[in-house]
Amino acid sequence: MRGILLVVLFAACATGGCGSAPAPSPTEVQTEEVKTDAGAVDLSRAARFARLHEAWQVERQRYSASSSTAAYWQGPNGRAIIAMGKEALPFLFEELKKGDHFYVWPIARITGVALPPGQGGGEQERRAQWLEWWKEHRDDPEWTADGR
């Protein structure tokens, strides 16, 4: 019964019956852009990251007893963010700027870059190294999702 109800609701929404505006067709995908320090980013990419990131924030609580930063990214939402690859980098760096060092691990995983060892400053020193790296490389086509 639930499956039938969902199909009926979906069909009603698809024909414009769920609100004042009709649902967009598959060819009317939004192309609006969001500005980050790396330039314009496709809104659908931003929306996907935002959805996964919100779910990851809840998911990571399951790993709070772990001393391994990598463990926090092993759940399905963490893995999905990493699977976004270069598309996720501008958003991960935006989060890293806010001060949470947990974003260092997926950034290193996605880029494959091995930064030189720090001077013993720990996680926050590593965070600062990555932010400096991003300043130098954010406009490099190798690190942009669309190669521009």
Image: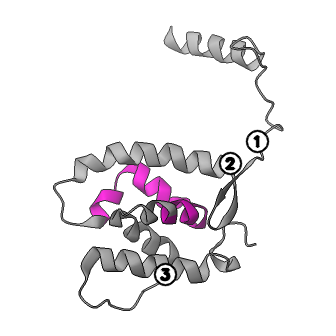
**In what element is the residue under mark 3?**
helix
The magenta span reads 70-93
Residue drawn at x 73%, y 11% is: 17
Instruction: Classify residue 15 as left or right of residue 38.
Output: right
Q: Which residue is mark 2?
A: 43
In the rendered structure, which amino acid carries the disc numbered 1? Gln
Residue 30, numbered circle: 1
**Residue 56 coordinates in the image, percent (x, y):** 39, 48
Instruction: Report the amino acid beneath label 3.
Output: Glu
Residue receiving disc 3? 132
Q: Is residue 46 left or right of residue 65?
A: right
Where does the image place residue 136, in percent across and percent down from the top left?
58, 83
Residue 3 found in image quarter: top right
**Residue 57, percent from left and from top:** 36, 47
Whether label 3 touches label 2, CB < 8 Å:
no
Magenta stretch: includes residue 128: no
Residue under the point 42% across and 87% down? 115
Is the residue under label 1 in contact with that under label 2 (CB below 8 Å)? yes
Question: What whole-number distance in Å separates the C-alpha atoms at marks 2 and 1?
Answer: 7 Å
Q: Residue at x 61, y 50 (%)?
A: 46
> Quadrant of the image for the C terminus?
bottom right
The residue lying at 51 percent from left, 7 percent from top is 1
Q: Which mark is residue 126?
A: none
